[in-house]
Image: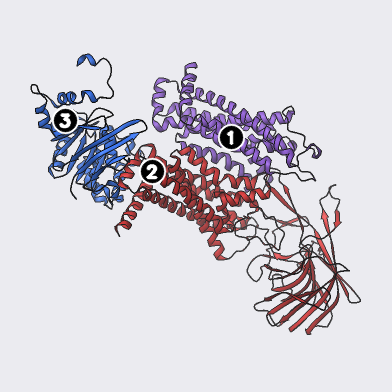
């Protein structure tokens, strides 16, 4: 396994664009969070915003770049035909996929940690100026606060799980544009179907099943009793999606001609 | 002439290129399919039913105004008949009301004194008492001063400010044939004209008199899952009129009074009734309801919510249409066949745009009729719109897909990498729409997103206009966009054209 | 249109690498002109400049007296085979030729004619992704012939062909030249060129080293009866960019 990891790491860091994609994750996540923190205001009468969740809204932008990173890690090989070279050098296909998955998780956790810390910092700096002061029941954002810490750590894990989900889809679909279309489609469309139906039971079911909505529940720090599922359970739903994608992709990888 | 022939040959070649890859043709069909399915899913999930006491009954269809639009026509009318020309002059000395507040304890009703901004009280000439019939009204409002309105959708402003015993308002509405003119005055001597209207087909005999009405109090809150929810609570308005003098034939008799449009409980008692009292020439009229367009229903574009799914598939196909050439070096063969590189790329854009347009038309041709049938079967009432508006929604939907296809193709030609192009196209076309409709962003930010980004094109789907003389939940998730329909599509088209120009520029300058 | 290719003082660099350094030659009609030189000599770059794909930094390349980009239906003037693998795998061979034909205002009948000419009738409706190397070469030749052009530019046409195919190609090229077309063939198979080409343009390091008939070249290189391969190697010894070590001793 060590040599698989080494080979995949060499491949990943020498792909053109591999260098700046993690930076783009950080930039978009922090940028999105900062933009939201700068534009949302809390009127003097008070407001019911979930502040930690608001300051982590950039994760919804960064996840798209994480998906690209995962997709190009494998689709590039199929596009150029290099997959044959890879599988000739390392015939155990499951090990190849596992190595890619481990590597992606590592890179995404690293970039995600920087991104999430940056977002929380941006929220901490910008929100008090917009009326989110302790006087309104909104204390300064701090990671010492257990729910905020859970929201932040959960967001980092969320990004890693998105990467694994995208990897599984990309292995199954092979073409980079289609893979990214499927990933973004599943993520964004499953999150808006909730607004298309009006039956509350259907809405709760769709919420529980949708990878983006359920996964982002880990960021919620207020109104937890009204949510259809608990934060960590939500992340678990996303983990199930990622596992299913990887499993499906792995099976197809093993059975198909290269 | 031969330049045209060469361009037509390029178009034909690009069309052959598209139709001979089965995967792309199937994908376009899938785009139409998911659009239809998602729209039908949304339609099946939308139910409307009203309760009469404890029983669920289908909701009554809203009355239609003279222009064919659905209207709300509910007010308290104190009136007399009028034959031919005449007028009515009144002095309004007070306008008060009450608004219901959200319950703190369940079941315990809380009300407070106050008027909602568009509470109305004044004088009116109306063609009978039928809901939806033509009318002209001159009124004072809760927060918008004196207004003259007619036929539900027209509104003219008079002098701003409220009324009180110290500063009353005189109102005069005169009828001359089809023409109605409204005047106001602060002292009853010097009159300023507020506005003039023509009510086509106004019969000789009309009702003329005093009225009061108050729309419900709208409160918009954040929904459980993000987005926002509108709540409308009961409000009523009471106005005091004196110095009432109707002029004209058949007036001068006794006053009739009617609670126009009042709904009744199962046992026959009126629900939220208005009221009327007269003592010594002073009339106190209380009304609940509104005389305005009715916009609380399903619209034809609600059957096309699948556009989001269709857009993603169209974007993927459009990007692949161009990046497939780069991946295998086929671009060189294309440029050998078409050395005028700008033309080659534009021919590609035209072909994929046309394919997406036809796909959109096909999808809408199925989704709209089927969707509206499902909506009606579920008890919903579709807000009627003119045929031209319906055509605009359908054609605009297809045009939006075409613009998205060209945009995505241009991005693919610019970046030459499939994943980056698809993500950028989705991020610029869909993400602003999603953020504006389904998240915590405030209304102002959401509207700027839908003005400045390529997602502005969604405005083409808006079938019900925003009426300034009505308080409504005018937010993107309710289907109201900040730009006019064609203006929004033009913004998206502008982005597509800009990126295409950049891609042509890049293609011309580089070695291949 | 005169069937000629005129290249005059072409200059091009890619960054710091000089690809073309004042290359000049002319390809005349009625004969096969071989275009040879070591790897990296600038053959492919020259061909791409002639075909308007790359822009030269200096000099000119004209086909029939006109630059390629000015031609309205270019494939009717110049047929080119550059990269046989440039195909959409999910598209059939016939459909590939069909879109090319449509882009030049040609009909499906012409497509079937060139399919017949290139011997691809059995596999025409098969997806190009499943083609072997030789089949792709034949498809590329078919595409080059689609417009019945007076000028042909072929980069490594013998590549991947089986022996029967090589014989066919050799005879085919001779027939095309005999029809009065100008045929420029770049190849590394010296033995084939010796039999096929009447004229030779030898390039090295971006410049033309020799522009002579094959017979004259063999005559000027002194020594016993010598093959084209030996004559070529002697000519280009100093112009080779990449040489594997361990071969020096063989000289």
Residue assigned mark 3? C192
Q: Identify the element where label 2 is drawn.
A: helix
| Residue B275 position by quadrant | bottom right
Please name whichever residue, B310 or C71, is drawn nearer the observer in this view of the structure.
C71
Q: Position of residue B237 (x, y in %)?
A: 82, 64
Question: Could you tell me how far apart the alpha carbons at marks 3 and 1 are, in whole angstroms?
Answer: 59 Å
Residue pictured at 38% horizontal, 47% vertical: B18
Please say if C211 is above or below B245: above
Judge from the rendering whether residue A100 lies leftward or rightward of residue C70; answer left or right. right
Q: Is residue A31 left or right of residue A221?
A: left
Q: Which residue carries the number 1 mark?
A: A27
Chain letter for the purple colouring in the rendering: A
Q: Chain of mark 2?
A: B
* Tag 2 and tag 1, C-beta contact below 8 Å: no
Pointer 3 indicates a residue of which chain? C
Q: Which residue is disc 2 drawn over?
A: B509
């Amino acid at each position: 396994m060590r040599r698989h990891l080494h080979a995949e790491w060499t491949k990943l860091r020498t792909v053109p664009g591999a260098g700046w994609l993690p930076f783009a994750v950080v930039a978009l996540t922090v940028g999105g969070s900062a933009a939201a923190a700068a534009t949302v205001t809390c009127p003097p009468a008070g407001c019911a915003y979930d502040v930690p969740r608001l300051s982590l809204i950039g994760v919804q932008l960064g996840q798209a770049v994480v998906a690209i990173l995962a997709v190009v890690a494998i689709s590039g090989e199929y596009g150029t035909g290099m997959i044959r070279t890879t599988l000739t050098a390392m015939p155990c296909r499951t090990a190849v996929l596992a190595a890619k998955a481990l590597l992606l998780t590592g890179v995404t956790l690293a970039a995600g940690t920087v991104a999430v810390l940056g977002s929380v910092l941006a929220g901490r700096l910008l929100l008090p100026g917009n009326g989110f002061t302790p006087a309104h029941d909104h204390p300064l954002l701090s990671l010492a606060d257990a729910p905020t810490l859970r929201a932040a750590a959960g967001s980092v894990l969320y990004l890693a799980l998105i990467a694994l989900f995208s990897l599984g889809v990309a292995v199954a679909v092979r073409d980079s544009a289609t893979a990214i279309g499927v990933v973004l489609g599943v993520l964004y469309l499953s999150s808006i179907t909730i607004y298309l139906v009006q039956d509350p039971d259907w809405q709760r079911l769709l919420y529980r099943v949708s990878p983006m909505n359920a996964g982002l529940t880990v960021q919620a720090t207020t109104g937890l009793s009204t949510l259809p599922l608990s934060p960590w359970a939500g992340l678990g739903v996303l983990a199930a999606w990622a596992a299913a994608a990887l499993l499906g992709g792995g099976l197809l990888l093993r059975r198909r001609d290269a | 002439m031969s330049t045209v022939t060469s361009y037509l040959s390029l178009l034909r070649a690009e069309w052959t290129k598209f139709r001979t890859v089965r995967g792309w043709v199937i994908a376009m069909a899938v785009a139409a399919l998911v659009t239809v399915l998602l729209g039908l899913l949304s339609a099946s999930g939308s139910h409307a039913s009203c309760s009469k006491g404890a029983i669920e009954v289908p909701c009554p269809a809203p009355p239609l105004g003279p222009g064919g639009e659905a209207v709300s026509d509910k007010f308290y009318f104190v009136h007399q008949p009028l034959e031919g020309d005449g007028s009515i002059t009144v002095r309004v000395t007070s306008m008060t009301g009450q608004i219901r507040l959200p319950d703190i304890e369940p079941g315990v009703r809380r009300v407070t004194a106050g008027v909602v901004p568009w509470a109305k009280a004044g004088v009116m000439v109306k063609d009978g008492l039928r809901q939806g019939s033509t009318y002209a009204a001159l009124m004072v409002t809760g927060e918008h001063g004196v207004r003259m309105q007619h036929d539900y959708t027209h509104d003219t402003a008079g002098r701003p400010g409220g009324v009180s015993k110290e500063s009353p308002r005189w109102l005069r509405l005169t009828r001359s044939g089809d023409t109605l003119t409204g005047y106001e005055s602060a002292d009853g001597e010097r009159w300023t004209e507020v506005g003039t209207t023509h009510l086509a087909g106004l019969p000789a005999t009309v009702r003329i008199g005093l009225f009061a009405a108050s729309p419900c109090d709208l409160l918009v809150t954040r929904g459980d899952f993000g987005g926002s929810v509108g709540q409308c609570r009961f409000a009523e308005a009471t106005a005091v009129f004196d110095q009432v003098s109707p002029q004209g034939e058949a007036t001068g008799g006794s006053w009739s009074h009617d609670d126009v449009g009042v709904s009744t409980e199962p046992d026959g008692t009126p629900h939220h009734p208005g009221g009327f009292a007269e003592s010594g020439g002073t009339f106190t009229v209380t009304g609940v309801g509104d005389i305005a367009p009715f916009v609380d229903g399903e619209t034809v574009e609600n059957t096309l919510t699948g556009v989001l799914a269709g857009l993603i598939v169209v974007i993927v196909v459009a990007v692949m249409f161009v990046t497939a050439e780069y991946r295998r070096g086929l671009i060189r063969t294309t440029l050998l066949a078409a050395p005028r590189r700008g033309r080659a790329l534009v021919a590609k854009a035209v072909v994929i745009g046309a394919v997406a347009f036809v796909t959109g038309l096909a999808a809408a041709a199925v989704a709209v009729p089927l969707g509206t049938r499902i909506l009606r079967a579920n008890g919903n009432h579709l807000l009627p719109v003119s045929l031209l508006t319906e055509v605009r929604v359908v054609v605009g939907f297809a045009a939006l897909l075409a613009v998205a296809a060209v945009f995505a193709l241009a991005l693919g030609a610019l970046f030459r990498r499939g994943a980056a192009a698809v993500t950028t196209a989705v991020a610029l076309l869909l993400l602003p729409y999603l953020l504006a409709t389904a998240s915590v962003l405030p209304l102002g930010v959401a509207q700027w997103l839908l003005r400045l980004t390529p997602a502005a094109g969604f405005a083409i789907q808006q079938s019900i206009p925003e009426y300034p003389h009505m308080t409504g939940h005018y937010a993107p998730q309710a289907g109201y966009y900040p730009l006019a329909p064609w203006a929004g599509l033009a913004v998206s088209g502008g982005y597509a054209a800009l990126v295409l120009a950049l891609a042509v520029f890049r293609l011309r300058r580089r070695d291949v | 249109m005169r069937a000629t290719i005129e290249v005059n003082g072409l200059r091009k660099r890619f960054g710091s690498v000089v690809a073309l350094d004042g290359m000049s030659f002319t390809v005349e009609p009625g004969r096969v002109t071989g275009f040879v030189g070591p790897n990296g000599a600038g053959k492919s770059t020259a061909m791409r400049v002639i075909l308007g794909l790359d822009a030269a930094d200096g000099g000119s390349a004209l086909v029939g007296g006109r630059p390629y980009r000015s031609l309205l239906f270019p494939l009717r003037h110049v047929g080119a085979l550059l990269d046989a693998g440039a195909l959409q795998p999910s598209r059939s061979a016939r459909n590939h030729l069909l879109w090319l034909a449509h882009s030049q205002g040609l009909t499906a009948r012409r497509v079937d004619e060139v399919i017949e000419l290139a011997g691809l009738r059995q596999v025409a409706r098969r997806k190009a992704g499943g083609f072997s190397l030789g089949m792709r070469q034949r498809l590329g030749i078919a595409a080059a012939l689609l417009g019945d052009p007076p000028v042909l530019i072929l980069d490594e046409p013998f590549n991947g062909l089986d022996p029967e195919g090589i014989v066919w190609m050799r005879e085919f090229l001779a027939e095309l030249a005999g029809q009065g077309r100008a045929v420029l063939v770049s190849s590394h198979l010296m033995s084939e060129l010796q039999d096929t080409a009447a004229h030779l343009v030898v390039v090295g390091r971006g410049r033309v080293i020799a522009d002579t008939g094959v017979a004259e070249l063999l005559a000027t290189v002194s020594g016993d009866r010598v093959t084209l391969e030996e004559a070529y190697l002697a000519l280009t010894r100093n112009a080779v960019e990449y040489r594997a070590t361990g071969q020096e001793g063989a000289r």
